[in-house]
Amino acid sequence: MNDPLAAKTIVLGVTGGIAAYKSVELLRLMRGAGARVRVVMTRSATRFVGPTTFEALSGEPVWLDMFESRPEAAMRHIDWAQQSDAVVVAPATANILGKLAGGIADDPLSTLLLAATCPVMLCPAMNTHMFCHPSVARNLARLEADGHCILAPDSGDLACGTVGAGRLPDPAVIFDRVLALLAAKDYRGRRILVTAGPTREPLDPVRFLSNPSSGRMGFAVARAAEHRGAAVTLVSGPSDLSDPVNVATVRVTTAAEMAEAVWRLAAAADIVVKTAAVSDYRPAVVAPQKIKKGAADATLALVRNPDILKELGRRKNPGQILVGFAAETENVDQYAAVKLKEKHLDLIVANRIGIPGAGFEAETNIVSLFYRDGRREDLESMPKGDLAHLLLDRIGGLSPGA
Ligand SMILES: Cc1cc2nc3c(=O)[nH]c(=O)nc-3n(C[C@H](O)[C@H](O)[C@H](O)COP(=O)(O)O)c2cc1C
C-alpha cells in the first residue's frame, strides 16, 4: 500500500485529559500510514499515559522538559515546530486551548505551538460543562479565527458521568481529519456525487436478491474527494462501512430507491462517480408473507430495474463528468467499450472480477480505464484507497464530453 503520510513529519501533542489513552491508537495509525511522529507530552498527560508507550510506538524520544541539558534538545521548540508538516493536539485540554489562545508559552507543547507555522489541529476533549463554559467557547472561537483547525468533540456519555459534548472522537476519525488536513485541495469548489454498495431486491419479508459488493470502492472515492476539498454526496446501498466524515451520506436499499436518490441529486453535481453494483433485476412480485417451502421446484419471475447509469448519461448536464464502473467476468474490454459509448460516459473503470486481489469484497482492485477519446490504461493491483486517489487524478484532467 502507498503510505498516505509517507515523508510527513507530525508532532502529536498529548495533554492531561482522560482521553489521552486514545492518542496511543492515533499514533499507531499515523505511524502505520508512514508518518514520522514526534510526541510532546504535558506533565499532566504523563499522569494518564506513560511516555514509554509513546516512545516505543513512535521510535523517538518523547519531549517532556523545556530545559533538557542535551545540546540537541536546546532549540527543540523551534526545530520540531519548523520541521513538521502538521501539529495535532489530541486530546486538547481546556488549559492548552486557553494558553494557545492567550499566547502563553510555559512548557514544551505550548511553546512549540507558538513556533509552528504548519497546520495545527486541536481536538478538544473535556467535561461538557467545561466545554460549554464561555471562556472555553471564546478561546475556541479565537483559535479558529487564528487559522487553527478545530475538530469538534463528539456528544454522548462522558467519563466524568455527564452527558453532552466533550468526548474525543475515535482515533480513526482524528486520523481521517489529519489526512484531510494534509491533502492538496485540488477539488475545492467541485461537487461530486458517488454511489456505492449493492442494492437489495426483496422477494418476501425475509429474503432478497443482492450481490457481495462491500461499498469499499465508492466509500474510498467519497473519502478521497472530501479530503481533496470537494463537496461530496454519497448514495449507498446496504454496507457495513460508517458514513465518511463530512460527506452527506444517503442510505438506500433497493435499486428503485437508489435511482430516486440519484435523480434527485445528480443535477447539482459537477462529477458523478457510479461505483454501486445495482441489481439489474428485481422479483416481479414481493410476497407480503414469507414464501413457504413447497413440494415442487419453484421459478422466480424477474423484472428489469431502471438503468441508472444509462439514464444519467441521457440527462447529463453540459459540463458534467460521468464515470461508470463495470464489473465483468469475461470480455471486459468489449463490454466496457460498449457501455462507455451507450451510456455517454467520460470514463469507465473496468473491474476484473474473479481474479485474486480484485472485485467486490477485496481490499485491492485490478482495473483498466477506458476513456471517451479511445485511450485505455491498465493499472496494477492496488488498494482501493490508492485507486480512489488515482481516479481523482485522472478525472481532474478530463474535459466533459457530450
Ligand atoms: C482524572 C482527571 C481527568 C481530567 N480530564 C480532563 C479532560 O478530559 N479535559 C480537560 O480539559 N481537563 C481534564 N482534567 C484537568 C487537567 O488535567 C488539568 O486542567 C491540567 O492542568 C491540564 O494540564 P495540561 O493542559 O498541561 O495537560 C482532568 C483531571 C483529572 C484529575
Image (tube, rainbow, N blue to C red):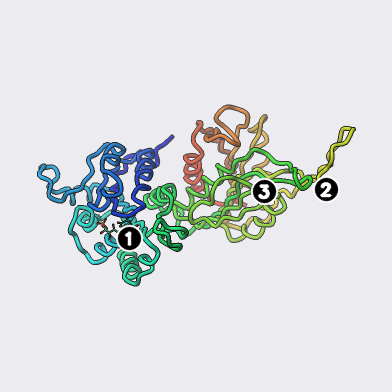
Q: Residue at x 12, y 46 (%)?
A: 68
Label 1 or label 2, whichever comes before in sequence order = 1
Label 3: element kind: helix
Q: Residues within 10 Å of mark 3 (few under 14, many from 20)?
A: many
Q: Residue at x 30, y 65 (%)?
A: 146
Alpha carbon distance from label 1 to label 3: 41 Å
Q: Residue at x 33, y 67 (%)?
A: 136
Compared with 75, 103 (above or below) is: below
Q: Residue at x 35, y 39 (%)?
A: 31
Q: Mark 2: which amino acid?
A: Ala
Q: Mark 1: which amino acid?
A: His
Where residue 17 appears, x then y in whole percent? 32, 55
Q: Residues within 10 Å of mark 2 (few under 14, many from 20)?
A: some
Q: Is residue 8 left or right of residue 401?
A: left
Quadrant of ligand 1 in image: bottom left
In the current view of this chain or complex, which residue is farthest to the top? 356
Q: Which residue is mark 2?
A: 287
Q: Say if residue 321 shows up in the picture.
A: no
Identify the disc placed on residue 148: 1
Label 1: element kind: loop
Label 2: element kind: loop
Nearer to us of marks 2 and 3 is 2
Q: Is residue 169 left or right of residue 317?
A: left
Q: Residue 341 versus residue 351: which sits nearer the camera?
A: 351
Alpha carbon distance from label 2 to label 3: 29 Å
Q: Is residue 229 left or right of residue 337?
A: left
